[in-house]
Image: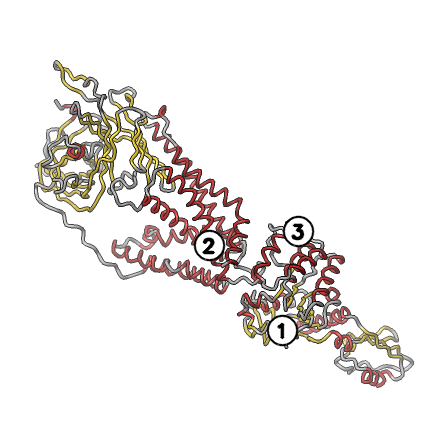
Amino acid sequence: MSLVWHIIKKDMRRMAPAAALWLVLVVAGTWAVRLTELPMDVALGGEVSRWLAGVRTMSDLLLCVEVVLAAVLVAFLVQEDALTGTESYWLTRPIGRGRLFVAKVGGAALLFIALPLVALGAAWLASGFSLLELVWAGAEFAGWQIALIAVAVTVAAITADLGKFLFAVTGLALAAVVVGDYRLTEWLVGPTSGSLRGARTVMVILLAAPLLPTVLIIQFATRRTRLAWKVIGVAFGLMLLVRVAWPVAGKTYPQSTPRTGPETARFERLVIPADRRQPPAAFLTLEPMKKPGEFTTPWNGSGELRWANGRTAKIYFNPGGLWGEHAVKRLIGMAPETGPVNWDMAAWFPPPAELPAAGEAPTLEGSVWAPEMRAQVVVELPWRAGATVRVGSCRTRVVSVALKPNSTQLCVVVEERDAWLTADSGVRFGSWLRESDYSRRDSFALVNRRLGIFKALHIVEAGSLRRNSLLLSERTLEFDPPMIVENGERVEVRDWERDAVLVKVRFKAMASSWVTVPAQPLPVYDEEKKP
Amino acid sequence: MNIIETENLTRRFGRNEAVHGLNLSVPQGSVLALLGPNGAGKSTTIKLLMNLLEPTSGTARVLGVDSRQLGEKEKAQIGYVSENQQLPLWMTVRQFLDYCRPFYPTWDRALEATLLKQFALPEDRKLKHLSRGMTMKAALLSSLAYRPNLLVLDEPFSGLDPLVRDEFIRGVLEVSALGEWTVLVSSHDIEEVERLADRVAVLEAGRLKFNEPTDVLLARYRRMTVTLGESEARLDGVPETWIEMERAGRVVRWVDCAFDAAKSEAECRARFGDAACVAQGMSLREIFLTLARTSRGAAAEVAS
């Protein structure tokens, strides 16, 4: 063991400057996410999203540099005592290959996992990570690094120098894309069924899984580099063969049976917006689930519109801008606790279909994919710019509240800094800002309990910056100020901002199923012509 | 006891046979010079012995162990210096020695200090900043300081100036005098190893021409000169051991590679009568060059 450590120390001395540079990049990138704050002066009209996208581009570039640099450094570490050729001085020294393997892997783990974990741990602790979050964040970082080290050590062990290493990595990456992406092979040999594709993918994974250990064993145990390359070639050949010619399809899992019944899902109306560039809004009602705070939430769906004259049109649905409004209102006790919940859905029609006209009521029949979600109020913030609330690792800040230029609408920019963990279990345990991800979704509302005001806020922009389990996200919300009718005129509610709070609610999926939309008339309204 | 023994050792690179059926033995305590022109298979042989290459067929035993099974224990008893070895050039001489030391239980720090002084190596200078001669000396030092039972030197003198070469040889000689070391040194130039070797093996085109003690070899080879009188000499049907036969006027010269004073004298008398016959001793270098020329001529004949 002492000799292993002796080799590791030698390698660390050799690698120190370059590894330190890499470590600085990793830690600086992470601390940058930890410390970056959205600038208040660019927080209107989507500018903040563009600003964040710019920062993210730089961050992503930095991440690429980090990954490539780490791979090159691992290769350098291995090739410092090269396994190929006959000229490395260690080959004639009393250094066993097993000992060398342990030293190289140990050195790589120390430099590229343990040391950065210590440095990143400080950033995570400073961000208020819980112990569980720390463990998960550490495990996720270590997992990615282990994968990178495994590939880099293996390829470096069978290449003579860094040039050949980079060449080999590029070639193997291309080969992996060819056998990994079914679209390429199906483009060549024609489409296949989903179950056959799944079976082929499983077979490719089964062939790929033992490849790295096999090559490592061959190279470190026998130094037969040609044999190692032959094994790689044969494995990729077999994977390609499997991808194009494996004949046995896998088990087909039946799609979940849609729940039926007119009380389950009902589209109330379709509204053609005044701004014709916006999609029509469809309002769907769904029964909530039995437990308080749990909802059957529509996500996307499709159906067919049928007119009495025989005309038909396909219609598709996605969550609309005010999705979750009713559920949130019920969750915070400002709506009755019983009865169906209304959901705002955006409807769209595939071209060349024409929009239904106001006043029509074609029959709609279809189905909606509706995850069962648990909703929870994550945070309530005072209604003012700069207001900040921190709950565990999640810090939410109102960056700005301002009148939208050339509009009567108000614009709120909310910044969140949070733990970003792939493996999370709780509602608030980690944010995930992929809008297409059905498993989580946030809704925001302006609430003034004193005046009984509730206004769902429309998410118009969203952006995020992620690095090493830290997330910086931004959401731009828009809404019309609360109005009342006084003396026959609509006027803004006086003093509505006093005691108002910004409420953030997160929906998290527990299970998913399809809900049938039984044949029903769908009245069409025009927002412009609305009284 | 033989420290190195090979049996029909063969190594092919594709269709090219670098070493062919080599049967070589190196007795303990001897200093064997493995000679041969460039491409003769010397380095390949040494790489096979050091398990840097695997034999295509045949076996090699080093320190009593199959070369393919050489482990840490055996390697701790072998010193290896090669002109092609890639040393960690980023280390200083001191760092290099400090790195090597823990791997050898028999490392002798006093010997290390002595050699460091004798070789005049600057401890704080990085290997990459040393001259070629200095680098080779550093490599030699790191291979001598643990008093190996077997020292293998693969073309260690290539590119070294005479002064450094002399220091190098002196270092090996002085240290080898300290114990029962076995040394295997390969070279394409006999002059370089003349002072070192007590045995000589010559490889040619992957085949072993001979392997015998230096003194036996020196006794066996003679340059013969005969100055003919009035009578004509018979130059046909000469013994096979007479090579490089040439005649210039009345002087006939050849090399007798199986010289025996009485027998050679009798053969001369039988062919040249009472002509003056002189037998001159040859240096190893001359013997080596003679062999190289003869083999090249034979190869050319076979090719034509």
Q: Amino acid at mark 1?
A: Ile
- Does residue B81 appear in this view? no
Which residue occupies the foreground of this view, A402 or B266?
A: A402
Q: Is residue A114 left or right of residue A135?
A: right
Image point 37% across, 27% down: which residue? A39
Q: Chain of mark 3?
A: B
Which residue occupies the foreground of this view, A298 or A238?
A: A298
Q: Chain of mark 2?
A: A
The quadrant where residue A61 appears: top left
Q: Is residue A474 left or right of residue A2?
A: left
Q: Quadrant of the N terminus of chain B?
A: bottom right
- Does residue B180 appear in this view? yes
Provide residue B187's location: percent of width, then percent of height: 69, 65
SS class of the residue under badge 3?
A: loop
Image point 30% across, 33% down: which residue? A390
Circle 1 residue: B3
Provide residue A526's location: percent of width, then percent of height: 15, 27
Circle 2 residue: A106
Coloration of the structure image:
secondary structure
Q: Amino acid at mark 2?
A: Gly
Residue sitting farthest toward the front = B110
Give the total of numbered labels: 3
The crowd level at tag 3 (other Cα within 10 Å; few <14, some 14-19, many 20+) is some
The crowd level at tag 1 (other Cα within 10 Å; few <14, some 14-19, many 20+) is many
Provide residue A83's location: percent of width, then percent of height: 52, 59
CA separation, marks 3 and 1?
34 Å
Which circle marks residue B123 in the picture? 3
